[in-house]
Image (tube, grey):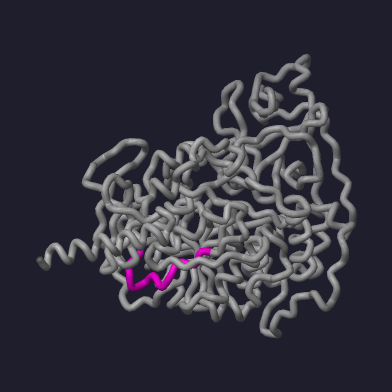
Amino acid sequence: MKHRLFLLVIVCISSINIFLSFHFLSNTSNVRGVKVSNHYPKINFKVEYGGYIMNIKDTVAITFKNDTVFNEAAYLKNSSEIPFYVHEFDADASHKYSASRYLPDQRDVSCRDINVEQLPPISVIISFFNEERSVLLRTIISILTNTPENLLKEILLVDDFSSDHSIGPPLKFLWKVKLTRNAKRLGLVSSRLVGMKIASSDFVMFMDSHCEVTKGWLQPLLEYLIANPKSIVAPVIDTIDSRTFLYKKNSILQRGGFGFSLEFKWEPMFESDSINPYTSPAMSGGLFAVSKSFFESIGRYDSKLKFWGGENIELSIKAWLCGGKIAIVPCSRIGHVFRDHLPYVLPGGSSSVVLRNNHRIAEKLLGPYKILFYDANPRAIDLDPITISDQLQLKKSCKGFDWYIKEVYPELRSSILEFLYHPAYEIYHNDLCIRGSVNILSYVNVYPCSTSPYHIWYLLGNTLRQHNLCLIVNEITPMSRLTLSDCRRDTVKKLFKVSGNRIQLIDYNLCLQLNGNTVVLNFCSSTASSQSWNITRKTFLFKI
């Protein structure tokens, strides 16, 4: 009799939950997912990796609050066959993997021996705008299944007024998940500030809505924050392929940097190991942890930065100037879906919004060096000036940008010297300019000429440079492609000479040649028009 009564109660509770969640909560039968009890972390996985099912167990649904069951299949219904451009990734490829897919431990073996106890809990803040459902759900589930229960205070979802208002409500039934929705579109910066305001923990983790955390991701970040409270700390960010959704571990550790265009770039750390944290001049901004007290002490995000763009550079510079630092912890690894373009247009135009944000940052933080920003971004000269009342009033204890260059990012000093005193050129063929990239080791191609600083090359000691990156040859063979890499590497071929309208690799009869939209090396030929380049000296807007 007691057994039947118990079953009756369970059926009634399940029926109520089905009604309240609009069928996003269901029974455990025939539902993909993972069951995690409130005692955490009793997990039953359907193990998927690389497109192969490695091990199959009886999978049940995702269940967190009061043992109710989240129906993943119902939540994702009608969200397949979405064109690539809608999200700038392949949603159908994402749907091939369950929200609870298994990822192998990405950490170095030595990281797994770290035993950190008595760490404080953290609030994870995720803002989203029209995020694809399977990707957002997988972000949340990866946090819940890879984070010790006592260290996760809450997951705060901030819906930035998505046009599909049904994305968020079903997710609030998940364990430790809270949802708030903006009354209008605010953008990433303001949405994160909304999350910060309601976070109940002393430490917060800002995270993009298209990520997957891996085993042991949080403990090293908290350990570093406790030892270095005046710091902003980030994990090593691995790549989730936007077309296949395979998780790709990045083998080269990198730090964050930027040029005077204030465009973020990655720089390789050839001498770093895979365990010890290291400092970085800047952070990418998509994933980082910080104490609320330090975040407030440096002025938080500038609330007048609009929507998205530049906020990571602004926060990085302020952290360093005001007694803190940016650090990257290799023992923490999180996957991120990198997209080539934003999947939506920001109000006023994406490029204009980013330029206005960077204009504000330059005026507030760069001091006399802001003139270099305007040279890299001529369009910013015509923007409305930043009034004194809008200026960032840094504390008296905060340092100036000259200190930042000297002590934190001396590579900018060489950029200044190159920028002012060394020949700068545009190299183009029929209005197509040879252009580098913000990504290290990416191929050099040609693009329509514009005002981008990545069209400008400096000829220094027979090296063609873009600040501290050099044009290099990976293979001394005809039709091999060229890349940008650290100029300090001595083992690469990087010496060129300019002869008239041709650019030749010194000691080899190989010249730069246009091949479609790519740049390759090929045997030098005086009759090959594809090896004939217009090499124009760049005239700067100022002289110092």
Q: Hey, which quadrant is residue 400 in on the image?
A: bottom right
Residue at position x 33%, y 73% in the image: 150
Residue 218, given in percent of the width and then of the height, sits at: 40, 65
The residue most toward the left is 1
Please tell me whether residue 401 is drawn above or below residue 514 in the rendered image: below
Tell me the quadrant of the picture where the C terminus can be found: bottom right
Q: Tell which of 230 and 458 is nearer to you.
A: 230
Q: Tell which of 436 and 408 is nearer to you.
A: 436
Count of marks overlaid on the render? 0
Residue at position x 43%, y 77% in the image: 226
Q: Tell which of 163 and 227 is nearer to you.
A: 163
Q: Hey, which quadrant is residue 88 in on the image?
A: top right
Residue at position x 66%, y 22% in the image: 509
Tell me the quadrant of the picture where the N terminus can be found: bottom left
Residue 101 shows in the view: yes
Residue 410 shows in the view: no
Residue 429, given in percent of the width and then of the height, sits at: 79, 28
Q: Which residues are magenta?
A: 146-157
Please tell me whether residue 370 is drawn above or below residue 532 in the rendered image: below
Residue 366, given in percent of the width and then of the height, sits at: 76, 67
Residue 374, given in percent of the width and then of the height, sits at: 83, 57
Residue at position x 65%, y 39% in the image: 471
